[in-house]
Amino acid sequence: MSAKMVLILGCTASGKGGAAFELAKMVGGQILSIDSMKVYRRMDIGTAKPSEQRRREVVHHLIDVVEPSEAFSVGRFVEMADQVIDELQQAESPIIAAGGTAMYIRGLIEGIFDGPGADTAIREQLIEQAENAGLGKLHERLVQVDPDAGKRIHPNDRKRIIRALEVYELTGKPISSFQNHFRSGNYRHDWVIIGLRRNKEEASGRINQRVKRMIDKGLVEEVESLLKEPEGLSSQAAQAVGYAEIIDYLQGRISLDEAVEKIKINTRRLAKRQRTWFRSFAGVNWIDLDEESTAEKTAQMMVDLL
């Protein structure tokens, strides 16, 4: 394989992890996880972490690096990832980066968005508006002033809605205008980027199967255990798809069946947002997969492409 740095992206349940594992075995590489939730210790089932056996066979980086009670940012991820990349480059080891967290991928390959700093007064005003008028009203305003960001940012993503409007208030420009450099393909490292994609019907079926496996493996018990920890869960961890819905169930707001259905729905929504993000990425070599595409076959297709 000529490329020493391969980045595999794709929507949730597309088969990235298995393909990355097989590719790493084929080329003697190590895996760099690009996932905002796999960084948390003891959040195993709901994040679909690789098994201990797989992690013994192939070294995985940036999994289980912080406590569930801690906040974690794109900036911190990029800092840690850059350190891993430096170490692996010095060891002349192929790097197989894999994940679906779009902002983390963006930060890794393009750098951190260098927009204006925070303005406490504007931010507090926006928070008050969200509390009084509802977050939906703020999202409607975002759609008006920045259609690109409004389409990309989920109506319930309070933090990013407020930040986008804060940037607009500070600069008079939409946040997407600062972020358009992401489409340039001028990346920080010499990545070969491979995208895995499936048709929506098959992707939805894989999501449903994954949710069933998570419940069967003990997702409810995992969340119960996390909630009993003295430090609790950070807001970031508690809002993760799969965890937020089970927390609602455990706190009596919905039934287990309702929680399971909500996980499926919210995971499909996540996949839709990922597809939107990934369409804007430059220089992606796409591989279309189907039901016959095993992890081994997918890895071989990647080797052939490289």
Image: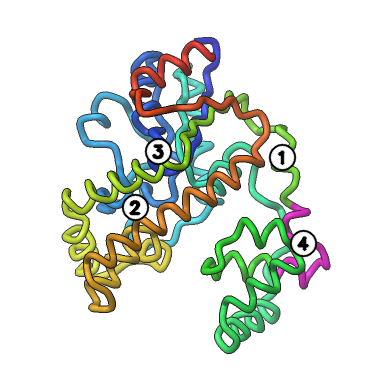
Residue receiving disc 2: 40
Marks 1 and 4, how far apart in space?
16 Å
Q: Is residue 85 visible?
A: no
Question: How far across and how far down the image is residue 201, in percent?
Answer: 42, 42
Instruction: Work out whether mark 2 precedes mark 1 in sequence or the reverse, and give the earlier one.
Output: 2
Instruction: Work out whether mark 3 precedes mark 4 in sequence or the reverse, and give the earlier one.
Output: 4
Marks 2 and 3, how far apart in space?
29 Å
Instruction: Work out whether mark 1 precedes mark 4 in sequence or the reverse, and give the earlier one.
Output: 4
Q: Could you tell whether 180 is left or right of 248 in the image?
A: right
Query: Comparing marks 3 and 4, which lies closer to the viewer?
Result: 3
Whether the residues at callouts 2 and 1 have beta carbons within 8 Å, the answer is: no
Marks 1 and 3, how far apart in space?
28 Å
Is the residue marked by circle 4 packed among few (<14), some (14-19), or many (20+) residues within 10 Å?
Answer: many
Whether the residues at callouts 4 and 2 have beta carbons within 8 Å, the answer is: no
Residue at point 35%, 43% (across, down): 205
Mark number displayed over residue 202: 3
Marks 2 and 1, how far apart in space?
30 Å
Badge 3 amino acid: Glu
For residue 2, what is the image quadrant?
A: top right
- Magenta region's main secondary structure? helix
Please tell me whether mark 4 sits on a helix, a strand or a loop: loop
Mark number displayed over residue 183: 1
In the rendered image, the residue lying farthest to the bottom is 132
Residue 132 in magenta? Answer: no
Please tell me whether mark 1 sits on a helix, a strand or a loop: helix
Mark number displayed over residue 174: 4
Badge 4 amino acid: Pro
Q: Could you tell whether 3 is left or right of 151 in the image?
A: left
Residue at point 27%, 65% (across, down): 246
Instruction: Work out whether mark 1 precedes mark 3 in sequence or the reverse, and give the earlier one.
Output: 1
